[in-house]
Amino acid sequence: MRVWPGQPYPLGATFDGTGTNFAVFSEVAEGVELCLFDEDGTEWKVELPEVDGHTWHGYLPNVGPGQRYGYRVQGPWAPEYGHRCNAAKLLLDPYAKAVHGDVDWHESVFGYELGDSTGTELEASDSGPFAPKAVVVNPFFDWANDRPPRTPWHETLLYELHVKGFTQLHPDVPEELRGTYAGLATPPVIEHLKSLNVSAVELMPVHHFIHDHRLVEMGLRNYWGYNSISYLAPHGGYSSAGTLGQQVQEFKNLVRTMHEAGIEVILDVVYNHTAEGNHLGPTLGFKGLDNAAYYRLMAEDPRFYMDYTGTGNSLNMRHPNVLQLIMDSLRYWVTEMHVDGFRFDLAATLARELHDVDRLSAFFDLIQQDPVIRQVKLIAEPWDVGEGGYQVGNFPPLWSEWNGKYRDAVRDYWRGEPRTRAEMAYRLTGSSDLYADNGRSPSASINFVTAHDGFTMHDLVSYNEKHNEANGENNQDGESHNRSWNCGVEGPTDDLEVMALRERQKRNLLATLLLSQGVPMLVAGDEMGRTQGGNNNAYCQDNEISWVDWSGVDENFVLLQFVRSVAALRRKHPTFRRRRFFQGRPVMGSEVTDIGWFTPEGERMPDDEWDEGAARSMAVFLNGDAIATPDARGEKVADDSFFLLLNADPAPGAFTIPVGPWGEQWEVVVDTGFAWISAEGSASGDPEERSLKAGTEVPLEGRSLMLLRRLW
């Protein structure tokens, strides 16, 4: 087999139309073999002939798309110094653009002798037949006239979904396409997203991942996919085609289809750790290539790994080649796969240079200056499990953040916790206390009440306790403090009063989310009452527990229509999606023109009443005539003004519409007490529209929300 010297860049396998260049980094290697596999599994080994700057490379004429390959590295096995090279182990290319096959959990995929608790005794059997292989891909794709939607942040409505789980049970998606990238690109899916006014889907991890050994032994799977092993390859299990490398083309078609519908594609990415785990984990790629370069090791004993993620290891963000891998991966997904942004899992881990979280770490400096990445949407999950890892509000100006304080405040307010009004006021208005001081805007706050991790919206109002028995850990896994309330009965019930209260609470939570300043994030299925049976950690449930049940469309049609209507209301009215914070800071009691806070009696909220323990009701005036920022063409933005009434008290209450400059005549447009929204959206109930004068006392159901629009 002829091997030419080739080039050290780009890293990975690059097909140029006539042959393929292979390049892989390893500083510790003494030699690197490229291993090619025939269809029957026969392995052909080729020594890479050149090394430049610790990059081993070679070019093979006539090797093209569909070729499976891996590497074997000759180098030191010295765990006490952090080195775990083992030539018996077939290694994935860190720059693989497609991966074929799952890990067959044979003992040979471990670099050490099983039973050795220190992970230091060399295991010398060949892992080749049991390890996944990288695949050379065809880089050519007809993007036609594809253009990124580039939806401004303040006009964005995010929708978090799982590629497989969203369509696996969808009756209108062809059976052979369910659970795949192709299934997600079908008209029924696009129509549903458009009906909710979704502007961006946030896909749970699609980097190729593996199913943990422990889960496989238990008959479970790593459903969520936060177990990445390849950062440039779309997960092979979500492809509807059997052709090697076809998942790349299928993913590109998904993005192109979403863009045609005006929907952006944002990826949930896991650059903080890999699927190789700790010193007792398998050797699949990074460990065998250059363990000490790719991972954070314990300085006092390099046999072991720093673990800021709770998964066994943390990537070494201090190493230039690790930073290069992540940046190359991000640029690849933007330039070659046309995605529109990223949500970074456990992003605080990426900021750790030594031990403490440093928001000006090298990673964020690279993002700031990169001409490609800095132009797309960047979302941080601003915490990890290490000391000092909770960093909500502390990320640099380019970034938006999953606002965990928003989630907690909204849950606490609607379940009736005392002294929550002041916190709720900040969250409703974009969390200026978290983001205003460093020049950020309300769009820095990704507002969410639920996410993949935790209870669904239905379960949040149906369970006080987690019910994770199906996970096989004696219900010990998952968060125990959920800020949930079961409305009086744990789990399913036939009690009509409890059922009605749960529906009202769901409407309260969803309406609050969609009417708050900032960027709302819905979770797939919440709009139609999806339940996981009280499981708040369904990461390993690749089954009906996690999949979206589309039969809920009929059963929960009223809720679905309500969400669609409030989302349409938000889209229509810039009052609810301002680009800048309200000018009256702090929010409590200031005499301002763009916002006003009121007691149920229609009086301006006194400062000393914000923290009154028993008070659970308040109202806010949102002035549509006082939007300070212009539109995209520099024109003044003028909108209707609204009066938002919130009553988290279990008892019915009454609000007096304030008399004065706020308005003289009002109409009800949203009332969660009756699952109703006015004809501005699609009515999901039929009470008569009510016109109300200033000074009128407006009755509210217990635990309900009402939105009034000013007529004049």
Image: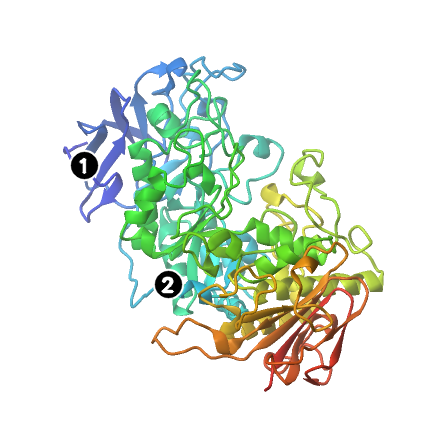
Q: Mark 1 sits on what residue?
A: 59
Which residue in the protein does label 2 denote?
256
Amino acid type of the residue tagged 2 in the rendering:
Arg
Query: Is 518 rendered above or below residue 592?
Result: above
57 sits left or right of 367 in the view? left
Q: Which residue appears at 39% of the width and 26% of the height?
A: 287
In the image, residue 41 lies at what x, y percent? 37, 33
Say which amino acid is labelled 1.
Answer: Tyr
Q: Secondary structure at mark 2?
A: helix
Q: Could you give the CA–CA distance between mark 1 and mark 2, rounded to whole angstroms? A: 32 Å
- Residue 176 visible in the current orientation: no
Q: Nearer the viewer, residue 593 or 258?
A: 593
611 relative position to 651: left or right: left
Of residues 234 and 272, the one nearer the viewer is: 272
Label 1 residue SS? strand
Where's residue 486, x and y in %?
Answer: 77, 53
Q: Residue furthest left?
A: 4
Which image quadrant for residue 362? top left
Q: Depth check: give the residue in front, 355 or 179.
A: 355
Question: Does 208 appear above or below 696?
Answer: above
Residue at x 46% of width, y 40% of height: 348
